[in-house]
Image (cartoon, rainbow, N blue to C red):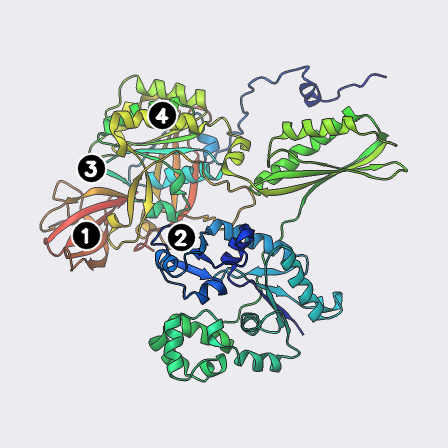
Amino acid sequence: MDRLACVDVPSLALQILVRNHRDWSGRPTAVVSHDTPQGEILQINRIARRSGILPGQRYASALSLCPDLCAGTISIRTIDDVTGFIKTRLGRFTPDVEAGVDEPGVFWLNATGMGKIHSSPQKWAKAINDSLRKSGFESTVAVGFTRFGTYALARGERGEIVSINPEQEIASTRMTPLSMLGLPPTIRGDLGKLGVTTVGQLLALPASGLMERFGAQTHRLHEMANGNLWTPLQPDTVAEPIVQHTQLDLPDTNSERLGFLIKQMLNPMIRAVAARGEAITELEIKLTLDHAADVVERIRPAAPTLDELQIANLVRLRLESITLRAGVIEVALTARTVEATPGQLRLFSDHGRRDPVAADKAFARIRARYGHDSVVRAMLTEGHLPEAQFRWEQLGSSSSPKNRGDGETRNRKEALTLVRRIYTRPVPMNVRPVAGPNGVHLRGMEHEPVSNIVGPYIVSGGWWHKEIQREYHFAQTASGKILWVYYDKKRRRWFLQGEVD
Amino acid sequence: MPDVATKLDDLIAARHLRRGDIPHNRKKEKKWSLDTLAGRLVEILSVAAPARLTAAFKVVRDAQRQSESTVWITTTNSSFFPPDAAEGGVDLDSMPVVRLPLVDDIPRAADTLIRSGAFGLVVMDLIGEVGRGAHIGRGAPARLTGLAKKHDTAIIVLTGDPRDSGRLGPLVSLRAETRRGNKSSSFRGGRRGVIEVHIIKDKLQAAGWRHTEPCCGPAGLR
C-alpha cells in the first residue's frame, strides 16, 4: 500500500529567527511584519505568549507588555531559501518531496518502501526528525496514508507518528483539534460556540452552509478532511547533475595537455549550466588512472561563475600542483551549481556586449531632453476600463530579459495575440453613425464604412465617483481594419478607443 | 617529441594567437525573426487588415527569448495595448518604452539609443497620431542604417500611411507588408487566425518570401 508522510516544521519563520539569533534562546521572541512600532506580531514563542502577547498585536503594544521581547523580521526570500534547504535535507530520506505552497514549513514525502530501508517507518521518521534537529529545526513527522490525515496528525502531535492502517489514521485525524490547523481565532470561536472543536465534529457539519457562515477557509478544510480535494504527491523534479566525461586513447600524465582537454569539456558544460539559469559553485574532476587509484580534485571559484577562463585557470593551477602516479585514461567532470544572478547570465550570454550601463546613460540623455516621464515601462493593473488595465511607470534602470534558455517551456506561449493600439485620449466620432451605401460610417463620410460589427461588451462602474457606462464593439471596415470603438451612454457619443494592429 | 597544438583553440589558449572580431556569420533563413533582422533597418507597413504591432511584437518576443535588450519608442498620443502584448508572451518588465510628445522626435531618440550599442532591437512606432505620419529628416535613414550595422541592432520602423514609406527611402534593408490572415477569415482572427508577413523588399536575399505566424484575437475577438 502506498504510504505518505507529512513533515511539519511549526512556526518556520520563528525557528529561522531563533536559529539566526542563538543568544535569544530562552527569551520571549516574536516575528514581526516590519521592524517598526506599527509592525504586526506574526509568530511568537511560548515565553512571549505567557507575557500576554498574541499574534495580530502591534509591536509597540507587545513591547509594552514585555519590554524584553526580542523581535525580528524574516523575508520571504529567506523562507524560500530555508524551504529549499529543508527540502534538500528531506531528499536524503526519499526521492519525492513536495513543499507546501500555502504553508511554509509543511512538506509531504513519499514514504512508500522507506520503512524497509530504515527497518521501520518509525525509525525512518525519527531519522528525519534527528536530521532536521541537527540543522537547528524542530519538526514533527507523521507517516500515514492520506495527505490530510498525515497533515492533521503532524500538526496536532509532536515527534513521530505512524498510522498502522487507514482506519486508524482516520480515527486519529478526527480527534485533531481545529486549533492546530490554522483556522483564524474568530472562526474557531464561532465554531466553538456550536461545540465544534475537532476535525470529526467539523466533518459532521453539512458542507453547503459552511462557505456562507464560516468562509472559504473553513469550507476548504472541510473538503480536505473529506478527501474531496485529494491531489497526488507533486514532488519537485531534481535536476540531474551536469556531467562531462571523455576517454583518452593513450594514458597521459602531461598536465598541460590534460588542462586543454578539460577546457574543451568545460565549454558545453558551462552552456548547459547557463541554459538552466545556474552558475557553477564547484567543479569535481575525476581522473581515472591506468592501474592506479583514481584521483578526485575539486575546484571552487571564489563565487558562483560561468566564466570559462576563470575555471580553466583554476583547473590548470590544480593540475600543475598534483603528481600523477600513472597516466590518465579517463576524465570526468561534474558541476555543482546554484541559481545564477541575472548579472552572471547576462555576462555569459552571446550578447554580453550589450552594456546596461550604456543603456542607462542613453536613457538619462533622453530624460534630460524630454522629461523624466519619457522613459517608462508598462505595468499591468487591475481595472475594467482599458485605460485602467495598465499604467506607465518611470523606469529605474534597465534590466535584462529573464533568461529563458532552450529548455524553458513553462509559460511559453507559442501563438501570438493580436495587439491593439490604444489612443491615450479616445477619439470622438460622429454623434450619430451615418448610413451609407456600403455600410455605416462611424467616423464620418470621409472615412470608410464599417461592414461588420461585434459587440457590445459592456463596461460600467464608478457609480460612487464618476459613473461610466460604455458599450465596446469591434468594427471591421471594408479594407479589413478592425476599429476598437465604444458608445458612451452618458455622453451619447461614439469614441474610437484604438484599433487592432 | 615536442607537444604539438592540433587545434586553433589550443594556440589561442596558449596565447600564441589572438582571435579578432570575426563577424557573426548569420545563417540567412527566410524567417520573420530577430536573426533575420539583426543589423538592418526594417520597415513594417500595412495596406489592409493591419498587423504591424503584432508582427513587431513577434520579433520583440524572439529577442527576449534570446536575452536581447529591446526598447520601444512611441508617442504619448497612442501606444500598443500592454495587456495584449503581455498575453502574447512579452515580458513588459524588461522592455523599456520611450514616450515622446511628438512623433517627429522619435528618430532622434532612436539615434541616441542605438548609438549606445546597448540594444539588440529598437522599435520606432511612427504611427503616432490618427492620420499623421512622422517627419523623418533626410539624413536619418542613412544614419540609422549605419548604426544598425555597427551595433548589430535590428531597427524596426512602423509606418502608417504607405506614402510614409517613401520618407525612409531606398536605404531600408527590408520592407515588410503585414496583414491578418486573408480577408474572408480575418474579422474575428478565428480562434486561431494567422498574420502574414510579405517581404516586398529585401537587400540580402530575393524579396517576395512570406512568413505566416499563428495568432489569436484579443478578448472579444475569439
Kindly check if marks 4 and 1 are in contact, taking CB atoms under 8 A apart as contact. Answer: no
Does B160 appear above or below A124? above
Kindly check if marks 4 and 2 are in contact, taking CB atoms under 8 A apart as contact. Answer: no
Residue A362: mark in rendering? 4
Q: CA distance from mark 1 to mark 2?
A: 25 Å
Could you tell which of marks 4 and 1 lies nearer the N-terminus? 4
What's the residue at 49%, 79% (across, down)? Answer: A199
**Residue matched to label 2:** B192
Residue A486: mark in rendering? 1
What's the residue at 54%, 59% (across, down)? Answer: A26
> Do dots 4 and 1 share one subunit?
yes
**Residue matched to label 3:** B130
> Do dots 3 and 4 share one subunit?
no
What's the residue at 38%, 57% (across, down)? Answer: A63
Q: CA distance from mark 3 to mark 1?
A: 17 Å
Q: Residue furthest front?
A: A67
Which residue type does callout 2 highlight? Arg
Identify which residue, A389 or A68, lies in the foreground: A68
Q: Counting other residues with Cα less than 10 Å from the Cα at mark 3, is it few (<14), some (14-19), or many (20 or more)?
A: few
Residue B62 appears left or right of A433: right
Residue A440 appears left or right of A348: left
Could you tell which of marks 3 and 2 lies nearer the N-terminus? 3
What SS does tag 4 mark? Answer: helix
Kindly check if marks 3 and 2 are in contact, taking CB atoms under 8 A apart as contact. Answer: no
Kindly check if marks 3 and 4 are in contact, taking CB atoms under 8 A apart as contact. Answer: no
Residue A64: mark in rendering? none
